[in-house]
Amino acid sequence: MSTVTEEPPTQNTSACKEMPGPVKEHELLQKFVGEWESEGEAFMAPGQPPTKLKGVESSHLIGGFWFVAQIKSTLPDFPYEQILTIGYDPAKKKYIGTVIDSMTSHIWQYEGMFDVTGNILTWETEGPVPSPQTPSKFREVTELKGPDHKVFTSSILGPDGSWNTFMTINIRRKK
């Protein structure tokens, strides 16, 4: 009785070496990496007082291409979690990203750009608002105020064509 020993398939490592690496635009994502704590407020309904928000963020880069963050916060009465990705698409010459969260089954898809200073990322998406459940346009901005402080704002496009900021969060690096 003879046994046949199969050799494992060989990996084509030269194909991996030929893949293009991160470009200079990917380097800006490093500024976001780290362990962060956040405090902010959101206006959940017109005429109502703001809802206070608190949370934590843990983030890292994957291969120098993708920023990935897990964000956990507590809204009044329930915990909230989201996964954020940000990358740079050299073909589109834009930053792209996604957000999935614990409140909806919608995957948010973003496109945007950093300003000339490399400290303000502005990007837009479209998705449902809770009431009425209709698609709306959103603009989100993350401004790096310094190496240990960033400010996130989220705005929704109103019927009159103006952007209405409904959420502002101060995010500080854990010490």
Image: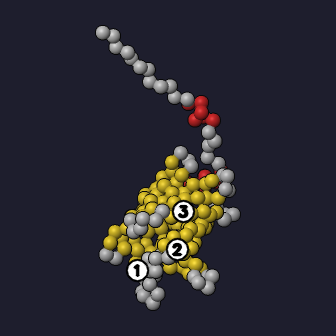
Of all residues, the one furthest to the top in this rendering is 1
Q: Name the image quarter holding the N terminus.
A: top left
Q: On the rendered image, what quadrant is the C terminus found in? A: bottom left
- Callout 2 secondary element: strand
Identify the mark nearer the N-term, 1 or 3: 1
Instruction: Choose between 8 and 55: the one closer to the eye.
Output: 8
| Most foreground residue, 133 or 57 | 133
- Residue 36 image offset from top left, x and y in percent: 44, 62
Q: Give the farthest residue toward the bottom.
A: 47
**What is the number of the mark on residue 135?**
2
The amino acid type, in three-letter code, at marker 3 is Gln
Q: Quadrant of residue 29?
A: bottom right
Q: Secondary structure at mark 1?
A: strand
Q: CA distance from mark 2 to mark 3?
A: 13 Å
Q: How crowded is the residue under tag 2: few (<14 C-alpha within 10 Å), some, or many (20+)? A: few
* Amino acid type, residue under disc 2 in the picture: Pro
The picture places residue 38, in percent across and down from the top left corner, at: 43, 69
Q: Tell which tag, 2 or 3, sits nearer the viewer.
A: 2
Task: Give the spatial CA distance, label 2 vs label 1.
Answer: 23 Å
Mark 3 falls on what kind of element?
Answer: strand
Circle 1 residue: 51
- At 46% from the left and 80% from the top, the residue drawn is 132
Residue type indicated by callout 1: Thr
Residue 143 seen in the figure: no
Circle 1 Cα neighbour tier, 10 Å, few/some/many (<14 / 14–19 / ≥20): some
Residue that label 3 marks = 109
Tell whether 142 sits left or right of 116. left
Which-is-in-front pick, marks 2 and 1?
Answer: 2
The residue depicted at 46 percent of the width and 58 percent of the height is 69
Query: What count of labels does the image hold?
Result: 3
Q: Nearer the viewer, residue 174 or 22?
A: 22
